[in-house]
Structures are given as structure tokens and as C-alpha cells.
Image: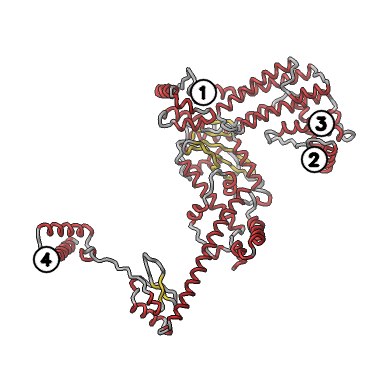
Amino acid sequence: MDKWLIRKSNTIQKDAEIENTQPNAQTQSANQSKITELYQEGPATSYTALKRKRVVRKYDADYLKIGFSWNEDEDDPRPQCLICYEVLANESMRPNKLRRHTETKHPGMINKPIEFFHTKLAQLKTSKRKISHFTTINEKAMHVSYLISLRIAQAGKPHTIGEDLVLPAIKDAVKVMFGDKNLKEVETIPLSNNTVARRIDEMSQWTEDQLIQNVCSSKFFALQLDESTDVQGLSQLLVFIRYIQGNELYEDMLCCEPILRGTSEEIFKTLDTYIRTKGLEWTKCVGICTDGARAMCGKKSSVVTRIREVSPIASWTHCNIHREVLVSKNMPDDLKSVLATSVKIVNFIKSKPLQSRLFEKLCDEMGSAHKSLLLHTEVRWLSRGKVLTRLVELRDEVTIFLDEKSDYVESLRNETFILKLTYLADIFSKLNELNLYLQGAQGANIFTIHDKIRGFIRKLTLWKTNIEDQNYGCFETFETFITDNEAKPSKAVISVISRHLEELKSNFEYYFLEDMQHFEQKRWIANPFHANITTGISTKAEEELIDLSENTFLKEIFNPQKLAEFWLSVEETYPTLSLEAMKILMPFTSSYICETGFSAMVAIKTKCRNKLQLSNSLRLKISCIKVDIDAVIKKCRKQAHASHTPHYLH
């Protein structure tokens, strides 16, 4: 090898000596540098070869007489035979080579008149235009197919609706509005069942990839998870995630995975497998929000315990809405009896279609504001308040309807029963208002939620005092009944109401007081400009808090409704405070988003679609990430082709 390199070096030197007809010191130095460069490039390169330049031959109109056109590419012009449509190399752009192609492959076309080749050229251009037009139509049809499939998924409709309803409707509209000339182009839109399902899977995968990319770039994330059963009887684990992007917090569905038994081990294994498969890091998890089920929050081997083992900084939040519902379930036996009787009255009318129609007719004749009662559902948070309120509003109509039909009419004519019923309607309406706020009001965070609960506890004390002082203004329906009927609540009724309010207060304190006291130590996050507050973290954090509290500009732009955005905006200036604040603000306060996801699941996976793979359709329905159709097509490397058109067009 060394000998060969030496010989090559000598050859290069000889070439350089031949070119140097008038050698001098400057020329020899230049040649020597060229020799060195060529030597470094490798043995296969020669100096004389580098001096060659590629010649690009141009097309001449006289080549048409030989039977050749060209590809009309200025950068790389190539001749194209008008007989066989073969495209030759640029080096063949010579009359002798073009003539040799014709004589060899098309001997019968020699000496044809130029008019013949003009006709062939026109046919070639026409076919190119048709192919280009057809390809453009198919590309548009494919894009429309993705758009319609996305709308089908977001509406939660069956995949067959595209071919059975959407496409025929589009054809009817186009035919009426624009005539039959554009009908064939509309018919090229592929919307079969399998095509729509495939489009949904591809868009869902793209959306998931975007979400994972956003979460990976986030410093922290928080999880919210719950488990429910679909129409097939299969348990579904639904997980939502909150992450940082820019200076804002975003929430989206992380995954929806089927599970068999719903044990803590299986739930954690399913979640852990997904997290690790997608390349996420457990060490970034700062919060988990679940309900109070034993599998979720038990002390020894629950899902929360297992997550804390892999993410020590993660904190657990017991869903505030579930706790509020647990509080409202406890009541004295007298009020439970009234509630049970009210539900039986509603069921007596609503359980039979004939009874419902007759009652609706009665309400219509009496000019009532409502024409039907509401069924009570134990699992729905707002059910009791709405059911009792509607029953109170239609109390007279129900009494007339039940007369001589049921013994329940005696309860509706009992003054004590109506007093307790109106009180329950009022107190559950107030609990419903609190429940709606806990579901996630605009700008709500852990501090505003605790403030709301603390205020409700104080209201319970006020209401108890007012009831004992015979001041009924806090309960509107209760007071209206007393005023209209000149009723006088007995001591027993007042005692029951007072005891119920006291029990509500005790239960609220039992479920929320410890949590509120813990977060009271973090009150500086809610208002860092308040006087005489400390962080209790470190000296550096105290110094940053002092500097922050004295910053006039930040004090002016501070908005308590946007705490997360504020602390993210000061991350570079006050990193210690920002880091600690985001660990508190990021975790979910309730599992409300999971409940909305389960509602969407019930609408998507019905008895007629019980074999549906739920995750992809559910993601497109509830995801906040906007799908980029062009990016999906590019990622999947889709190419418009005639085979993508419906079968009836072939």
C-alpha cells in the first residue's frame, strides 16, 4: 500500500512538472500545495481529473425531427422518446445517439414527417396534464378524507357514517349547488370504514407523539387517574397529564388502557409500562390525584405508594369533589327518610311511560314551567339537588296527579314533610354550587379552592345560627313555603335542620381541615407581596422572597387568577421560589377531567360498537392538541394514488 502511495505521489509530481513550462519559486510553491491537497484527498483522485467540468447539453428543437422531446427540466434536461416515452441520460442529447435509439428500437419510424411527431408530442403533453390533474385531485381527496375522519372522531360517531351518510350528503349538496361536473371529483374521497379507522389511528398517533414531545420538554408533570367500566364490562384506566409549555400549564389525555382486575399492582404496572415505553421520567412527577379507593390510596401497596417509590417528590391529592360528595351523604335519619320518599315519588311517575306521558299532559294543561320530573342517580354529583328542586317546583302538579293513585300523596300534603323537603332542596342546591366550583372554575387553584371551602364552612355556622333564631332568609324555598302557607316550623324541624348543618360542618372539617392547614404554610405562593410572610425553605429562598416582594413592577402585573403563569415568568430571576411554587400549583385538585373522559367513553363505545379500540377515538375527541393534517400525511408518507379511490370508481 505504501509503495502504491509513493508511485501515485510521483505521478502527481510529474503532471505538475509538465504543466510548469516556466518554473519559478512562486509557481513551484503553488504546485506543491496542489500536490499536497490531492495527496490528502486519497489515491483515487488525480489533479487532471479535477480540472474536468460536467457539460450539460441543451435540447434543440430540431431533435423533434428525430422523434425526441425533453423533460422540460432546466437543471437536468433529458431527451424523451415520443414513441416509447423512454427518458434517456443528458449525455444522449446528441443527434447521432438519438438517431441510433430510433433506428434500433423503432426502425419503422425512420423518415416519418415532422407532422407525425408533432401529433405524438401533443398526445404526450395531454397525457401529462391528465396525470397531473388526477394526482392533484387524489391529493385533495386524501386531505379531505383526513378532515372528515377527524370530525367523525371528535363527534364520537361510528366510522361507517363517512361512507353511509357524509359522502352521499356531500354529493347531493355538490350536485344541487354546482351540477354534475364536479360530482366525479367528490366521489374520489375515500371514506370507507377501514379507511376512516386507519386515518383516526394515524392522527391519534401523531397527537400522542406531540404530547409526549411536549411532556419530555417540561420540567415537571402531574397525573390524574381513575378507573371505570365500559359497556363491554372491560375496565378502562384513564390517565390525564398536566405539563409546562412556555409560561403556561396544559392538560391532556395521556393514555386510556384496558385492565383486567383493577388491582393496585395491575394499575401501576400498566401505567409504569406506558411511562417508560414513551421515554418519560418518573422523577419529574410532582403530583398524583385519585379518588379514595383502597387500590388507589391505601397505605401499604396502593398505586400512590408505588408511584412515590419511583418519584419521592410526588404528592397525593384526594379528589376534592369526591370528598365533598362524601360530606353531603351524611344526614339525620329524618332527612334520609324524606329523601327516600321523594325518590320513590319520582320513580312512581317516571318508571312507567304511560304515567310519564299523562303527567306531562297535566303539566302542559296547567301551564307549568317544567313538564317532567328528573330521575335520581346516585353516581351523579348534582343529581340530588336537581331532583329535589324540580319536585318542589312541581309539587302542586304531583299532588294532583297522585290523588287517588298512590299513598305518597299524603306525604305531599304533610306540612312537616314539605318543610324538610324544601330545606333539602335548598341545602343541596348550595352544595351543588360548591361542587361546580370544585370542578374547575376559571383561575381556580388549590388556594382558591380551600378559600371557597373555608367560606362554606363559615356559612354553615351562620345558617345554623339564623335557623335557630327563626331567620329563614338563607334558604329561599324554605322561606317561600313558610310565607305562602303561613306555616310555622316546629321545634323538631328546627332541631333536625340545625343538627344537619352541624354535621355538615364537622364532616367538612374532617375531610378538609388537615389539608388546608398544610397548604396554609405555603400561602406565600398565593400572594408573595403580603407583609410578614416566610417560605420556611431556606435562606436563599427567603432572600429571593424579599427581593420579589419589593419589586414594584412585578407587584403591578401580579394576578391571583394566574398564579402558575406568574411563577413561570419569574423562573430565571427567582429560581428557588419558582421551583417550589410549581410543585404546589401543578398537581390536580380533582379528578373531574377523568369523569368527563368517562362520559365521552360512554358516548363513543356503545352496544353497537362494543369491540371498538377506545384509545385512539377517545384521544381525538377530548385532546386539546390541534391536528396538523399535512404533518400527519408527511409522517405516514402518504402518496395519492388511484388505488385510494372507492371501489365503485374502478
Mark positioned earlier in the residue sequence (3 or 4): 4
Q: Secondary structure at mark 4?
A: loop
Q: Please report contact status of discs 1 and 3: CB closer than 8 Å, yes or no.
A: no
User: In 3D space, how far apart are the residues under numbered discs 2 and 1 (Cα atoms)?
Assistant: 51 Å
User: In 3D space, how far apart are the residues under numbered discs 4 and 2 (Cα atoms)?
Assistant: 114 Å
Kindly tell me whether residue 492 is visible in this rendering.
Answer: yes
Which disc is residue 523 wearing? Answer: 1
Q: Is residue 622 left or right of residue 101?
A: right
Q: Is the residue marked by circle 3 packed among few (<14), some (14-19), or many (20+) residues within 10 Å?
A: some
Q: Please report contact status of discs 2 and 3: CB closer than 8 Å, yes or no.
A: no
Residue sticking out furthest to the top: 469
The residue that disc 3 covers is: 395
Which of the two discs, 4 and 2, sits closer to the camera?
Answer: 4
Q: Amino acid at mark 4?
A: Thr
In which quadrant of the rendered view does residue 29 lie? bottom left
Which disc is residue 351 wearing? Answer: 2
Mark positioned earlier in the residue sequence (2 or 3): 2
Q: Nearer the viewer, residue 278 or 202?
A: 202
User: In 3D space, how far apart are the residues under numbered discs 3 and 4 (Cα atoms)?
Assistant: 120 Å
In which quadrant of the rendered view does residue 180 lie? bottom right
Q: Secondary structure at mark 3?
A: helix
Residue 144 lies, in percent from the top left, at: 57, 56
Mark positioned earlier in the residue sequence (1 or 3): 3
Q: Secondary structure at mark 1?
A: helix
Above or below, 235 against 74 in this view is above
Above or below, 574 against 467 in this view is below
The residue that disc 4 covers is: 21
Q: Secondary structure at mark 2?
A: loop
Which of the two discs, 2 and 3, sits closer to the camera?
Answer: 3
Mark positioned earlier in the residue sequence (4 or 2): 4
